[in-house]
Image (tube, rainbow, N blue to C red):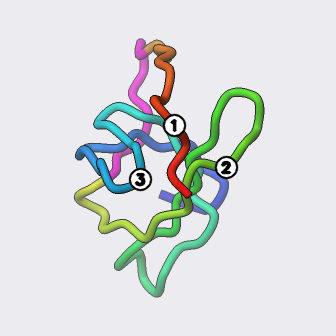
Amino acid sequence: MKELQEVVLNVDLPEYGLMRGDIGTIVLVHGEHEGYEVEFMTLNGETIAVVTLLPSQIRPIAPQEIAHVRALEKIPA
């Protein structure tokens, strides 16, 4: 996985209001892919969170997948 690649979250992160299946963008690769900074945004461009994640916590978007919209209860501060 590389910078600016969209990825899918493999785990729930309730402290950030994120759920498995949410889509984020890699904004920084740590070292030799030991970890990633991933930005999650609303569809209108508001950042929800920038989170440091392990490779096991995200995956590339697979062929034949479709995005799904959900509303956040509130955007975490």
- Marks 3 and 1, how far apart in space? 10 Å
Q: Is residue 24 above or below residue 2?
A: above
- Which portion, as a residue range, is magenta? 58-65
Q: Say whether disc 3 or disc 2 marks the residue closer to the N-terminus.
A: 3
Q: How far apart are marks 3 and 2 (CA)?
A: 11 Å
Q: Indicate the secondary structure of the residue bearing disc 2.
A: strand
Q: Name the residue under label 2.
A: 47
Residue, disc 3: 16
Q: Nearer the viewer, residue 71 or 60?
A: 71
Vertical order, 23 against 37 (above or below): above
- What kind of residue is marked 1? Lys
Is 54 in front, or is 74? Answer: 74
Residue at image x 76%, y 29%?
44
Q: Which mark is residue 51?
A: none
Spot occupied by residue 4 in the image (x, y as percentages of width and height): 66, 54
Q: What is the three-letter code of the residue carrying label 2?
A: Thr
Question: Measured from the top left, where is residue 35 in percent x and y?
Answer: 39, 74
